[in-house]
Image (cartoon, rainbow, N blue to C red):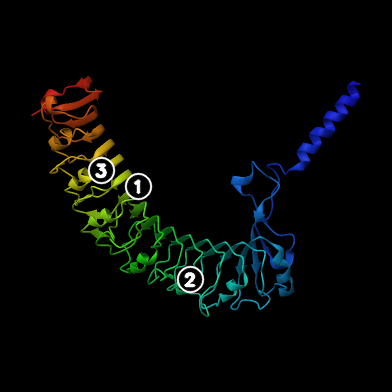
């Protein structure tokens, strides 16, 4: 009986082992078309737990050695990743009805890729490392919801995308010569736009490209909810004519390897934010802003971040907002925090690595800030504690008189260190 149980257990265990590949099972990630259908596979990390036995398709290379009669066999594939190393797209690419996800890699300059229209039920299109490709006319893809174009150093125009009204998300990453954001039909459904303009992040001596991307056509995206722009040159103001559905607005200029910031945008006016009553997140990092001011009484934000805004002198506009859950001001050169009124209901306000701050009397008098965390330098002086209206404080600073630290919880100072030299 024991032997039978052992055999049954062994068979059960073996079936579990061979039902799905283990960690030592590998698949090629790049093959030539001639090797199909022994096509390459890449595991989708997000789906391993659900179905380890269904890895997604890897890259198939089509070049001068490939047997093009195999191309029609690819029509059954739902996901395709193709590296077409030819100067013309093979005529065999017609009527691809099943493919919903297409990834095209390393396309040559001047290659016409209008064949994408043959993928009639395409939902996701990814174009990587292409030259200055061309189209006969517009792309007409009624099912396409997402397009991601990246690392196309010579690409100058994406006009062909303008008639795709089913798009919801568009990501343009590292396309430094792109002249303008595509002018989409007014009936578009685009909700998410991510633009990362410049190639060269990480270099130690590079300067920003003088090239400016024309983004005026963003105002045609009437359903736009999220706009993220990185390394986009020449912005001087926050646009005031974007979608009223806007919820997330971010400008992020990426730090270079030598820790300097190559400032690309000198924003003189942020008052455009007042037009977007549904805004939830504002993130401005690595740009030049002298003053964040204006009347923002209709805004109820979840997050407001100002990071590496070294020329910042005025943040009075923050205190005109209706409410903000969290404000974070980091690596900024601001000296005095002041305003004409403090009506904003702020749950938490954090100043991090802003060592030039000298005066925060106005800030400490605000009655609608629940928690303040602030790190200061040798110039910081405080009014007498009886003027502190914020119920929860965490303030620290280092200076000639040593250091001070004060913690206040629910209106009571619960811990302090050498505070007197820093009180006026």
Give percent across and percent down for residue 325: 32, 39
Give percent across and percent down for residue 199: 41, 62
| Image depth: mark 3 or mark 1 in front | 3
Residue in the image at 81% along x and 33% along y: 12
Mark 1: secondary structure = loop
Q: Quadrant of the N terminus?
A: top right
Res. 267 image quadrant: bottom left
Q: Residue furthest bottom?
A: 136
The residue at which mark 3 appears reads as: 322
Give percent across and percent down for residue 184: 43, 70
| Image depth: mark 3 or mark 2 in front | 3
Q: Is residue 411 left or right of residue 80?
A: left
The residue at which mark 1 appears reads as: 280
Residue in the image at 15% along x and 34% along y: 378
Mark 3: secondary structure = loop
Q: Residues within 10 Å of mark 1 (few under 14, many from 20)?
A: many
Comparing 76 with 288, the one in front is: 76
Mark 2: secondary structure = helix
**Mark before the other along the chain sequence, 1 or 2:** 2
């Amino acid at each position: 009986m024991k032997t039978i149980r052992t055999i049954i257990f062994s068979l059960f265990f073996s079936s579990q082992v061979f039902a799905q590949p283990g960690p030592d099972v590998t698949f090629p990630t790049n093959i030539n078309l001639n090797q199909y259908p022994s096509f390459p596979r890449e595991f989708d990390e997000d789906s391993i737990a659900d179905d380890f036995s269904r890895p997604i398709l890897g890259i198939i290379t089509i070049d001068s050695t490939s047997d093009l009669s195999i191309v029609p066999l690819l029509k059954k594939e739902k996901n395709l990743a193709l590296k077409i190393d030819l100067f013309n797209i093979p005529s065999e690419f017609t009527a691809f009805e099943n493919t919903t996800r297409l990834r095209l890699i390393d396309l040559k300059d001047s290659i016409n890729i209008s064949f994408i229209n043959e993928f009639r039920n395409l939902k996701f299109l990814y174009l990587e490392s292409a030259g200055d490709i061309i189209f006969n006319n517009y792309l007409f893809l009624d099912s396409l919801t997402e397009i991601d174009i990246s690392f196309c150093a010579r690409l100058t125009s994406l006009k062909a995308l303008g008639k795709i009204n089913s798009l919801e998300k568009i990501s343009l990453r590292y396309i430094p010569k792109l002249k303008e954001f595509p002018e989409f039909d007014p009936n578009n459904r685009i909700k998410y736009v991510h633009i990362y303009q410049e190639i060269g992040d990480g270099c130690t001596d590079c300067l920003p490209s003088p090239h400016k991307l024309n983004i005026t056509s963003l105002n045609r995206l009437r359903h736009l909810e999220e706009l993220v722009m990185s390394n986009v040159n020449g912005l001087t103001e926050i646009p005031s004519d974007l979608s009223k559905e806007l919820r997330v607005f971010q400008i992020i200029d990426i730090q270079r390897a030598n820790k300097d910031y190559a400032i690309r945008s000198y924003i003189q006016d942020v008052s455009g934010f007042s037009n977007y009553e549904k805004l939830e997140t504002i993130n401005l990092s690595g740009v030049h802003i002298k003053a964040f001011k204006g009347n923002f009484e209709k805004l109820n934000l979840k997050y407001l971040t100002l990071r590496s805004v070294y020329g910042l002198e005025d943040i009075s506009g923050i205190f005109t907002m209706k409410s903000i859950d969290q404000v974070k001001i980091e690596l900024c050169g601001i000296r005095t925090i002041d305003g004409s009124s403090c009506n904003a209901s702020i749950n938490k306000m954090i100043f991090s690595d802003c060592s030039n701050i000298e005066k925060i009397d106005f800030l400490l008098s605000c009655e609608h800030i629940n928690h303040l965390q602030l790190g200061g330098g040798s110039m910081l002086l405080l009014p007498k504690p009886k003027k502190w209206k914020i119920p929860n404080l965490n303030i620290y600073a280092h200076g000639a008189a040593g250091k001070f630290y004060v913690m206040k919880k629910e209106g009571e100072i619960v811990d302090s260190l050498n505070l007197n030299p820093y009180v006026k």
